[in-house]
Image: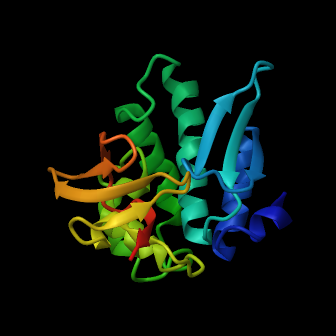
Amino acid sequence: MEATLAKYVPPAAVTPLFQLIQTHQVHLKIVNERVTRHGDYRKRPDGSHQVTINATLNPYRFLVTLVHEIAHLVAFSQFGARIKPHGKEWKQTFQRLMLPYLRPEVFPQQLLPLLARHFKNPKASSDTDAPLALALKQFDPPNDKNYIFEIPMGGEFRLYNGKIFKRGNKRVKRYECLEIATGRIYLFNPNAEVEFLK
């Protein structure tokens, strides 16, 4: 397991992560990319704990996602199953579990201030923290995708599922986008990755 982890996370994080996984008896499953999520946690019918993470994540996003999912397990174990999935108990647990990794031995210097700010009040997904998501994206392999906020007003883009949209106005945080085929309006996070149809 330690050798497997070493392929996916920064070297300085391997041993403490391995210990965290062992302590909480996590069954870690690394899978091919799922477009809608980076990872998830579920308690299996036999009572064991499974965390599933996308194999395609860069080492820093993989680490943040893995600790995020283990924080669900720990928070549910400590506070019971009735807590909100991303409520204050989970936030406190995530902050506590992530703290040992917020060091220059683990993360590049340019990510540390953004991570420190993010972990003052962690969100349900690091993707909704636009500055952090952008900074983490720099470590992804290059792709031909654009963020929604980079698409010009009225510009058209395609989603992974083939649906085509036209970018509209920005609301408070998200963009209104018109689905061409149905005329329905959908809201998109500014840093959702899409294919710009130039």
Examine the rendered structure and indicate whether residue 73 appears above or below residue 190. Answer: above
- Give the image quarter of residue 152: bottom left
| Residue 11 visible to the viewer | yes
Residue 107: percent from the left, percent from the top? 51, 75
**Vertical arrangement, residue 135 with respect to residue 164, above or below:** below
Q: From this viewpoint, which residue is outermost toward the front?
A: 181
Residue 93 is left or right of residue 37, and the answer is: left
Side of 5 where 144 appears, left or right: left
Looking at the image, which is closer to me, 11 or 100? Answer: 11
Residue drawn at (27%, 59%), measured in percent from left and top?
167
Is residue 147 or residue 30 the one in the foreground? 147
Q: Is residue 183 left or right of residue 111?
A: left
Horizontal and vertical percent position of residue 154: 23, 65
Image position, residue 134 (x, y; %): 39, 72
The quarter in which the N terminus is drawn is bottom right
Residue lying at 60% horizontally and 79% vertically, measured from the top left: 141
Image point (37%, 32%), residue name: 87
